Amino acid sequence: MGVFAMPSLGADMEEGTLVEWTVAKGDTIARGDVIAVIETQKGAIEIECFEDGVVSEFLIDVGKAVPVGAPLAIIGTGDAPDVPDPTPPEVPASPPPLQPPTPAPDVPGESPVELPDEEPLETPELPPEENRLSPLDPPSPPPAEDIRASPAARTRARELGIDLRGIRGTGPDGVIVLADVERTQPASDVQQALAPPEKDPKAEMRKAIAAAMVRSKQTIPHFYLSQTFDMQAAQDHLAQLNKDRPPSDRLLLGALLVRATALAARDCPTLNGHYVDNTFTPSTEINVGLAIALRGGGLVAPALMQADTLDLDKTMAAMRDLVSRARTGRLRGREMTAGTITLSSLGDNGAEAMSGVIFPPQVALVGLGSPKTRPWIIEGTVQPRSVVQMTLSVDHRANDGRQASRFIAAFESHLQTPEEL
């Protein structure tokens, strides 16, 4: 039997809100199954289970926010639950039926007493109904204009739609003052005024990003290496691949960049992994995190799992799926925590260069500026070529300049042979 706890979905996450259970009590689940949806500062994320078993008990109600590590559910072994004894409980014997009372015997010589006839009493004549007064009718309240109230109190009462006749004045000689009116505001108005302001999702996401980036800059000793290289071969190869494809099946340059990053990480494993507890541990998987800008602001970096094992078409399909789910708030927990190296590209309309901040506990980030057409010297001649500037951000605790340079050289080499990607 195990405890399913609130996972940490990022270095900046402190708590999450359970918004949905996707399984029911008694369901059999396997490792990797999505069993819950958690709302974080970066949106709703589907959470996978990390063990096989049977959902035995839910410990948290939907809608409740709990800190990271708090138990959410009990995952049992699937043993047969205790079955109550099918023998029905003994039923006490029914009491004997009650005997009807025996009627009293007639007493001889006695007869019922006859009452004398009486004349009916005359009913007094009542006055007309409109002229009658009920002792229970309360006295009529005085007109509102006769209520003694300060001008400010009258104005405020009109604004709030409050009848002055229902207010007890606390001013001199019982005059209603402004404070009396304020105290009689409708409860909903008071509660609304006292209720904490609703959280702005965009502001919460900025807080999360700020926390992660501050932690990164304060704890990771970054250094940066940059290089500009020729992208023309990759661009030409991409145009050739897309020539006969419908628009929905065309590849984007991003797919080639992901492949180049994954293959370079395989060539240089010291930049692919996590630095935790003063120790760098290279990862056996290459999960390339993609920095995805969300519509309306914000940024997430879910991972493309085992990116080095995907060809270009599968990489493109996985990227489309990841971006779509990121923008609809349906990412999965493992995608948010299993990244081993991050790629951040500014696309076609961005700046020429970008020096990114490493996403902890990773140790490297590949930053790519926007491709530009620039004069480039090839075999002694100047030619217009599509070039891009790459800046590699590196954790100096895990790597030095030599390893970083090897990674850049490997990245460029793979892009110069795009047919092998």
Image: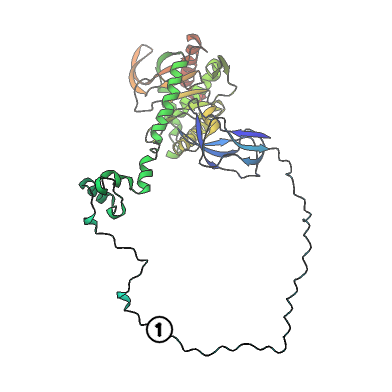
Disc 1 secondary structure class: loop
- Front-most of residues 293 and 172: 172
Q: Residue at x 33, y 76 (%)?
A: 129
> Residue 172: image x %, image y %?
24, 45
Q: Which quadrant is the N terminus positioned in? A: top right
> Residue 218: image x %, image y %?
44, 16
Q: Which residue is mark 1?
A: 123
Q: In the rendered view, does 338 fall on the left or right side of 230?
A: right
- Front-most of residues 349 and 19: 19
> Residue 267: image x %, image y %?
55, 17
Q: Is residue 316 visible?
A: yes
> Residue 97: image x %, image y %?
76, 70
- Front-most of residues 9 and 376: 9
Q: Residue at x 35, y 46 (%)?
A: 189
Q: Is residue 246 visible?
A: no
Q: How is the image coloured?
A: rainbow
**Vertical placement of residue 377 versus 59, above or below:** above
Q: Residue at x 28, y 60 (%)?
A: 141
**Vertical placement of residue 60 versus 210, above or below:** below
